Structures are given as C-alpha cells and as structure tokens.
Amino acid sequence: AQRVTQPEKLLSVFKGAPVELKCNYSYSGSPELFWYVQYSRQRLQLLLRHISRESIKGFTADLNKGETSFHLKKPFAQEEDSAMYYCALTGAGGTSYGKLTFGQGTILTVHP
Amino acid sequence: ETGVTQSPTHLIKTRGQQVTLRCSSQSGHNTVSWYQQALGQGPQFIFQYYREEENGRGNFPPRFSGLQFPNYSSELNVNALELDDSALYLCASSLGHRGDTQYFGPGTRLTVL
C-alpha cells in the first residue's frame, strides 16, 4: 500500500525566513513524487514534480529514497506563499501509474 | 484553452438519494481522474477513466460509478448516499494516463443530510 505523510498540519514563518514542509512516503516500488498547492479561493495546482528537477517560485524538493522523504524547501518565504500544500505520490509504472495518493496537507502561513 | 470545469458547484442531497456530478476535461486531454476530499483531509483517488474505459479504481464501494463520453467529459454517480459521502469532489484531466500532469477542476461540494 502507498501512503504519504505530512506531519505538520500548520506551519507559520515570517517573511524572509527559510521554510521546509515535510513529506514522508511509503511505497514498495519506484515512486514519482509531487507537490501540489492550493492558494486561497483557487483550485489545486501542480507546484513541482521530482522528475523535472525544476525550481518553481523559488521552491525546490529533493527525493531522498533512503529516508523516503520529499521535503519542500524555500530559502526566503514570501507572504504570497501562504497556501495549503499537498505532497502526492504515484507509482512510476504498473497499475498505480497516474493515480495520485495525497498527504493530508500543510497550511503554510507567512507573516509580514 | 479552457480549463477543467465541474458542475454543479454545490449540491445538497438527503441520505439514500442518488447524485450525478459532471466534469469537462481540458482541451486535448483524454484522461479524467476523480477524487473525494473530506473536510481537513487530502484528496482520495476514486477512479480514473482513459478513452471511455475505467483505468483503475481506489478503495470506494461499487455505489460509486462513473462514465466517460467520446468528448472525454466525465460523470461521477453515487447511489444510496450516506452522510459520510459529504465532501468536495474533484476531477482532474490529463493528456494521458501514464503519469502526465493532472489539472484539477474547482470541485463540487456535496452535502448529504
């Protein structure tokens, strides 16, 4: 069974501070990991996926297979980063390919 | 290019009733996935349709069923509604079913009384 755990339901930081949103996963095969974001009154949208190795809006995430983690990081948080963040996983092949398993989400608040 | 749309926005039903939710996929996308998001939880995968065929199902009972039409729009049907079915139902479309980026609609909020 595949599972995604986001241990923090709420995370508060001040503008300009570094931020790290934690994500741990459980999957027996080779996973693909994603971060989705939902800003206030907007729909869920993809922030980044590990295979693209992009930095989006200053956010990066590294897949650590040894620790089964995919933490999201940004060196200097901005107020517009305040949102709900979901970590998600899919199997990279097989019958679970393309079916997302989400964590419970972390609400990030960036204070001025 | 039109994004994913869902209808209706909100819906109130009573226990035992049946409901149909609709989703129009983004132009050019042939795959639709449905998710249930209970309050305070992350979305949970219900099922996926690829070119009008069911292509995977999550841990949901058979009273949750779906359809995909030739234009790739999709319906989610829920029979014999239960109180626990109250949730936000999200649909997402993608170019294909092999891990392509999923684009989400705004969701339908279903309340079962």
Image: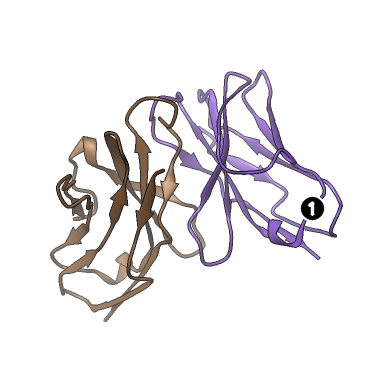
Q: Taking B105 as reference, is B108 left or right?
A: right
Up-down: is A38 above or below A46? Answer: below
Query: What residue lies at 61% left-to-right and 41% top-to-bottom?
Result: B5
**Residue B108: x percent and y percent?**
66, 52
The hue in which chain A appears in the rendered picture of the protein: brown
Q: Residue at x 44, y 27 (%)?
A: A95
Quarter of the figure with the C terminus of chain B: bottom right
Nearest the eye: A82 or B77: B77
Residue A112: image quadrant is bottom left
B67 lies left or right of A10: right
The percent position of residue B109, horizontal first and vertical second, equals 67, 57
SS category of the residue bearing label 1: loop
Image x and y of residue A18, in percent: 15, 70
**Chain B tint as drawn:** purple
Q: Is residue A90 left or right of residue B7?
A: left
Name the residue beneath numbered marker 1.
B81
In the rendered view, tell whether residue A64 sits above or below residue B54.
below
- Residue at position x 16%, y 74% in the image: A16
> Which color scheme did the rendering employ for the protein?
by chain
User: Is the residue marked by circle 1 packed among few (<14), some (14-19), or many (20+) residues within 10 Å?
Assistant: many
Residue at mark 1: chain: B
Instruction: Choose top left, top right, bottom left or bottom right for residue B50.
Output: top right
Amino acid type for the residue under numbered disc 1: Leu
Residue depicted at 24% across the width and 78% down the height: A13
Q: Position of residue B39 (x, y in %)?
A: 57, 65
Q: Is residue B8 left or right of residue B60?
A: right
Taking depth in this image into account, of A78 and B17 the one nearest to the observer is B17
Marks counted in the figure total 1
